Amino acid sequence: MEIEIKLLAHPPDLPAILRAVGEVATVVEPPAAKRLESRYYDTPCRTLKTQGMTLRVRRSGRRFIQTVKTEGDGLFVRGEWEKPVASFAPELDGHAEGLGEIFVTDIDRDKLVASFPTWRFDPSRIELAMDTGVIRAGGRELPVCEVELELLDGAAADLFDLGARLAEMVPLQLSIDAKSARGFRLADDTPPPSVKADRLEFPDDVTLEDGMRDSLQACIRQWLANQASAFDGRDPEGVHQMRVALRRLRSAINFFKDFIPDPPLEEFRDQSKWAAGSLGPARDWDVFLLETLPPVMELWPEHRGLRALYDGARRMRDEGYTEARVAMSSPAYTVFALRLAGWVERRGWRAGLSEDGMKAMKRPMTDHAGGLLDRLYHRALDAGDDFDGLDAEAKHEVRIALKKLRYAGEFFRSLYPRKDVKKFRDALTEMLDLLGKLNDLTVAQGLCGQLMEAADDDEELASGTATLVTFHEQRGHVSDKALSKAWADLRGADPFWRD
């Protein structure tokens, strides 16, 4: 298995990266340059890709190496098997039928080996490869300029720490997008896919520490797995799922903060809030354009005010995605992601734990999950006291409290009977869906206000806004009766974490 991280760079910064490595690590094998030409193979229906595999034949000098890679246990871990072959033609013991060349990568690589950290008696050995070149497929090209850090020997956390140190010194952007993934998208002319959260499955006796580590890693996986899609912008689910992942991450940090005295935790929570906030405008305008505005425009497609709303929203959406891309490209974002991944990998919370704290960490997570879920449940009930009399702002606070409860339930649900979980989860989902629609209309009114303010109260925009709001209010965007019933159903549902 290989453990590696990938950092996107700009060609003029490559010399600075070499200098930075020399400052923070000990170079044990000096840089060596080589040219790598690789050809990737699959069937026309992408059989290997569908199964999470890639097949590559690479020429380095006069040697040809065939490599099969598979998806590993995490974002930064993959299976890899290599063997020498005679040419670019794959050698699969008679199983190469139907395979064809999909794309080619032509890369100039400068590679060195360094030990890190320098202060430790047994530092890790890390290979650093700087790749520049191009991916070619179907007459199209995509430039490549990236730094790959691969753990040769030692602790995986050191890999993340070295990446973070380099990103603090040189502008680098974290990426989990392998060249093979980019090559297939280039060949098929498809956007990066969005990724929903994995369902966590814990054994009954999982400890609090292991459950906490797995929960945090699952959030990081979903977050970074959606980065390419969010950056690309063609699939609105990319930004949405990335934002969900960051909210889940912040919620997980809040769940476990009582057990972790480590000071970085507060910083990680603030940074996850900042990262999620940078995606907010893009997501709000996506919802406006895809859900709030279309049913009104279908009835009045020639309405000049609605057309003005649509055109203004498209411009604001583009600005929102620009803001998101700036955040994702920033050194602060990359350093945050790498530091957090390294902290979780090394179980950094142990540094500040007392003996009693370590004992709590080693107890079954079921000893703690029920109490946590109960606290979140009662906070939501308290927020919704006299629910029918609450205004829109107060109902939004109920929504936030219920989302925290849902995230906690998703983390811990495998510890409880599935049937019990489903009944409660269905009631919670229905309530959140209705509150979400109510919030979407409130957000839409605010977005219309932004457009009108920017256009100096344009009469067409004012007309479009009035038509939009009136339509949703009269059509019962969310009726009070439906909300009241959903709240009663949720209060009547048995909490699955109780005996």
Image: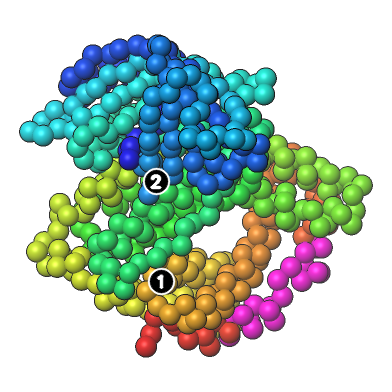
Which region is colored magenta?
470-488
At 81% from the left and 69% from the top, the residue drawn is 474
Q: Position of residue 296 (x, y in %)?
A: 83, 56
Q: Position of residue 304 (x, y in %)?
A: 88, 45
What type is the residue that disc 1 sits on?
Answer: Ser
Rounded to the nearest angstrom, the CA distance separating label 2 from label 1 is 22 Å
At 37% from the left and 49% from the top, the residue drawn is 73
Query: Upstream in the sequence, badge 2 or badge 1?
Result: 2
Residue 471 versus residue 115: which sits nearer the camera? 115
At 47% from the left and 69% from the top, the residue drawn is 406
**Relative side of 118 to 273, left or right:** left
Give the label on residue 414, or none: 1
State whether residue 95 is above or below residue 196.
Answer: above
State whether residue 350 is above or below residue 320.
Answer: below
**Quadrant location of residue 440?**
bottom right
Disc 2 on helix, strand or loop? Answer: strand
From the image, tell me which residue sits under label 2.
72
Residue 326 versus residue 158: which sits nearer the camera? 158
Q: Position of residue 144 (x, y in %)?
A: 50, 21
